[in-house]
Amino acid sequence: MKSRRWALLFALALALSVIAAGCGGGDDEEGEGGGGTTAAAAEDVSGTISTVAVWTGAEAKAFQKVVDGFQEKYPNVTVKYKGAKDPGQVISTAVQGGNPPDVAALNSPGLMFDFVDQGALKPIDFAKSDIQANYTPDWVKNGTVNGKLYGVFFKGANKSTVWYNTHAFEDAGIEPPATWEDLIAAGNTLKNSGVPAYAFGAGEGWTLTDLFENLYLRIAGAEKYDQLAEHKIPWTDPSVKETLTEMTKIFKDSGNIAGGTSGALQMQFPDSVSQVFQPSDPKAAMVIEGDFVPGVVAGQTQAKPQTDYNVFKFPSVDGKGADDVVGGGDIVVMFKDNPAARALVKYLASPEAAEIWARQGGFSSPNKSLDTSVYPDEITRTTASALAQAETFRFDLSDLQPSEFGGDAMFTDLQDFFKTSDVDATAKKLEKDAAAAYK
Amino acid sequence: MTSTSVRAEFPNPVGTPPAPRQRARIRALGLPASFLAPAAILLGIWLIYPMVATVVRAFFDDRGDKFVWFENFDRMFSDPIIHTAIKNNVIWILVAPIAVTAFGLLLAVLTERIVWASALKIVLFMPLAISLFAVGVIWRIMYREDTEQGAINASLKVVHDVFKDEGVLPDARPSSDAVSDRFVFTKQLSAGDTALLGLTAISPREVPEGSTQAVEPQSTSGAITGVVWRDFSPGGGTPGTVENGELGIPGVTINLLRGSNTIETATSENDGSFEFADISGSGYRVQVAPKTFAQPYGGVSWLGASLITPSIIIAFLWTSVGFAMVIIGAGLSAIPRDVLEAARTDGGSELQIFRRVTIPLLMPVLTVVFVTQMIGVLKIFDLIYAIAPGSVQNHATTLAFEMWKRSFSGQNNFGLGAAIAAFLMLLFLPFLIYQVRSQRRNL
């Protein structure tokens, strides 16, 4: 009786220890640490490195081909890739647990600032000359924190684009407008032709912040944009109010928006796109959003590029900012300094890496050394070269804010503005929420 | 084992060292303890430790480094969005559990003795088999305001259209100032005059079948002639004048007004022309009949700010009523038949029996269902996340949702999230204590 009891206790203890071992994290294998020589031979670099980024599904497969290209160059390095819907959260947890990936692609500079603050990132100055050769100064600046280079942009998004239904434009007899005033006039003509001019996925606030940012950059200029981004000027500044007033020219006319004001406020972004490009009887003629729209069009409608849909640059305002680009991008950063990680960062900063994904489609590179003929279609070529060559490029302002403002309150405030068109109240509320977030 | 009865007859006097039987008793606890140990340890790791750690975390800042006393709680109670969350939680607590229990009772009684009772119960119970998030997605799609997309508004539109007809041109606007906002031709007319009723914001598809090129109306003595047409040419054209390529709109009712009375009506031809013959004198006006512009049924804004919380509560009811019905149904069948028989022979009507016999006997079951729903409702999150569009999230939010949003949706303010979680735990306590106590009593 007694021995059976002890045997049982021993078995239980064994089971518990097995479970505990299984629950604990596995050891990560690092390549040789420390700063090696800058020009290590490709065969000398070895190790296993882990990477995390936001790309999943088809994008993960495309990125895997880029990684394969890297592993061809560096045959002794193994790269493990993990896609995460919210890389910031995944990596934050990993950093807190003391086990960050070697290299990661973050989808907002705010995350990069946070990690630099925490001391989790290693500077990538070893790649500085490459990066300065391949990117315009604005792009390099966006990866710089406190004078040190921490990130290089691998994938970019051009948000200064407007996508339109070519048939609707034909029926209305209008050409893609080049100025903001022409855009408003075109909107009225479209309305008279019987199709609402604009589709907004206003249920997702970022569609509205993108419009604000494009207008603000052109109305207030790049310097003020930077000041607003760092909250050095308040949101009650006259330049903000002027921009909001311009936006009311579109928002006030509920009949010219697909679904009306209340319908648009409930609509998700993909639906707003498919409404414009559905096969017959489009619900609107234009959607003002970035170069990821074709992906949604391809996935949800039968519209063909150039026959059914096309793009024009976000128009200039008062003749200013015709080529300005507001956009986003994925920044490649390094958490652990080892030769393999350095090699990967340098590789991703090169046009070869960009070319591999560019050929597959669904990708724009901010790398200006990339030969744009490798893009699979005319439309991507247009939006991507605008992105890489822009003299004035600014990162999406809402992504630069502390996330409780730029990811939440700013959206809600602009959604309320979409409903009310009340410029003064909105400016005050934006300032109040921004001040609270920056405290 | 006989030791128990022996111990009862010879209790151990106080102050003496444990007798061998005491030690045996302690050793006898060893086996149950070792069986409980794995569960207890896992509970300790995955439940007790996180619970304590969360409460402790609530006193630190968002990064977790600085001890900030009650700052998070202060922030929590001064944030207007969290006020809305608390208000919504109160609404949920007051409405949902009672509604679920009441509907469950109703359905249990109704499905008690009908044919196919089991099949019906299975169908009504099925929503519980899918995840609450999936329920939310389903209802989100059904709640769409567009009557061509949302199932609920589409059904309402069918009912609405039985009573009211949709106009031929619901979105049309006057093309120029020559036509007023109420679609009256602004110029006063006499016999021999013509009227140009230009309309825009009409898509080519909306123009009825058989329409042809609009014609400029000819002045006819003793009559008023006119044309109603789609006044739009590519590029805009010249509003107010009939141009090549602009189509007339057939089948539109035109009213001839004198003062504010409609004295005659006419219908436009394929080329949009109409004529009022035998006119004498002046002081006439023509108007496109208002019913042409009758708006289609717009649908109820289920996902708008005012209705969002009721809409989500309805989705929750759909999920949980089946559960309540099954439990209460079991309770109903446990009621002894002779009690009901006795009540009937005593001359009670069905309603009286229901109120005074059935419900009191069902009270324990009803209370169980009620308290369970109460606990489920306090932590409602998935439905809010799935159903409420971003623009109304701040109107539909609850404490659990705010806790998630502040901690995990990118804001990473774990201190504030932990404070909300701690507060939520406090709200649960009365119900948990009640449940534990009532279970103890039943044992």
Image: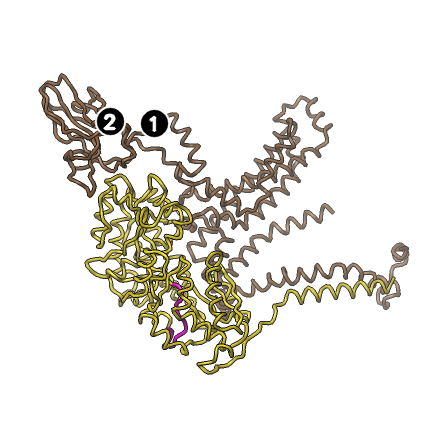
Give the mark toward the camera: 1 or 2: 2
Magenta-drawn stretch contains B242? no
A307 shown above or below A235: above
Q: To which residue does mark 1 refer?
A: B165
Which residue is painted at 41% across and 60% down in the image? A404
Q: Examine the residues drawn in magenta and state their main secondary structure.
A: strand
Q: Is residue B247 left or right of residue A45?
A: left
- Letter of the chain that mark 2 sits on in the rendering: B
Which residue is painted at 72% across and 61% down in the image? B38
Q: Which residues, given as a range, are shown in magenta?
A: A144-155
Snapshot colouring:
by chain
Question: Is circle 1 on the same chain as circle 2?
Answer: yes
Q: Mark 2 falls on what kind of element?
A: loop
Which residue is painted at 20% across and 27% down in the image? B271
Magenta-drawn stretch contains A147? yes
**Closer to us: A131 or B193:** A131
**Closer to us: A81 or B100:** A81
The first of marks 1 and 2 along the sequence is: 1
B272 shown above or below B308: above
- Picture coordinates of residue A194 (x, y %)? 27, 39
Q: In this view, does A289 lie to the left or right of A357?
A: left
Q: What residue type is labelled 2?
A: Pro
Apparent colour of chain B: brown
- Picture coordinates of residue A347 (x, y %)? 43, 71
Q: To which residue does mark 2 refer?
A: B250
